[in-house]
Image (cartoon, grey):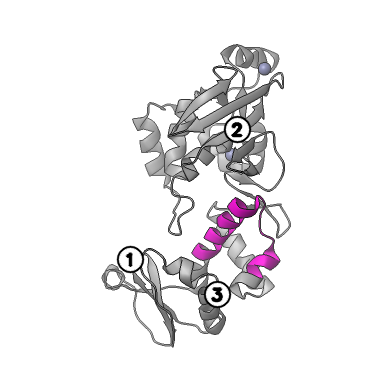
Amino acid sequence: MVSFTGNDSNCFKRSSPAGLSLAFMKLTNLSNLWIKFIGNCMVEARAGYEYKWSPKTRSAGLERVKLSETIAKPVRKFVFDYFLENSRAPVLEEIMQSFHLARSEASDILEELETAHHVIRLPGTQRILMANPFSALDTPFAVKIGNKGYFGACAWDAVAFHIMLGRESLVNSFCHHCAEPIRIEFRNGRAVSTQPSDPLVFLSLPAAKWWENIVLTCANNMVFLSSRRHLDDWLKENPVVRGEALSLEQTLKISVPIYKEKMKIDYARPSKEQLTAYWDSIGLHGDFWKL
Ligand SMILES: [Zn+2]
Ligand SMILES: [Zn+2]
């Protein structure tokens, strides 16, 4: 048996990455892996006997989990923490090192995280391109927080940093129409200073299509415009483009269910039903918002 201890508030900090790595290293090749939780905290891991999973066993604090299910959460958290700390994505080798994984195992975990819409790899590679709101590639959506700089994957993502981290953030971007600079300061849950005065976030693809190709969606279809007039000019010049324009306040609001808990170990993406119900509750109805 491999076990380690901790408590609700600091166990992952204390046991990860070294403690977790040790446990996973020793258990990697065992078919039945048992993890005991107290609250959200993994306190014990052991292998070797059958136990049927049921809601009852879950509430008793004992859960049967596959290795990938167990380690996907810490790896997701590791990717986000790494982005936050280093302003870039970790490479696969850093994930292999930190979790004592073989290349194929680390790659499988990334694939699983991509399927669950937590990270996006550069197609055909093992390189992380995005872990929204973070982009590993420079974009027109620069975000400054404290003394660190990041790139949001799209205009919405640039705004969402403030919701995800709850810290003052400064967005430096451009009008999608005329490329004039747009500068927005977020503090205490709202935009406290904007230049020009009323920039918009324009989403030109309906919600149901966002994940058909999230790289193109973020890169081309979620942009800032300096004002309603700049948007109208843009639409006049591009008559096939349709979409929804959101104020900064609305963009902050729609960010809450997807982004607020992203830095937590137990983050789960809201379901389609939860999202549409939430959008409905803040007045975003209609075909555009159907998932
Ligand atoms: Zn413009
Ligand atoms: Zn995006």
- Is residue 148 among the parts visible in the rendering? yes
> Callout 2, which amino acid?
Val
At mark 1, the secondary structure is loop
Residue at the (71%, 52%) spot, across then down = 123
Question: Picture quarter containing residue 230?
Answer: top right
Question: Where is residue 135 shown, x and y percent of the image?
Answer: 65, 45
Mark 1 touches mark 2? (CB < 8 Å): no
Question: Where is residue 133 shown, x and y percent of the image?
Answer: 57, 44
| Main SS category, magenta section | helix
Q: CA distance from mark 1 to mark 2?
A: 36 Å
Question: Where is residue 48 shown, x and y percent of the image?
Answer: 43, 88
* Quadrant for the N terminus in the image: bottom left
Circle 1 crowding by C-alpha within 10 Å: few under 14, some 14–19, many from 20: few
- Is residue 29 among the parts visible in the rendering? no
> Callout 3, which amino acid?
Ala
> Callout 1, which amino acid?
Gly
Question: Picture quarter containing residue 184?
Answer: top right
Q: Which residue is mark 3?
A: 18
**Which corner quadrant of the figure contains ligand 1?**
top right
- Sequence-wise, the earlier of marks 3 and 2 is 3
Point out the stretch of residues depicted in magenta.
73-96
Residue at the (54%, 34%) spot, across then down = 159
Residue at the (58%, 31%) spot, across then down = 205
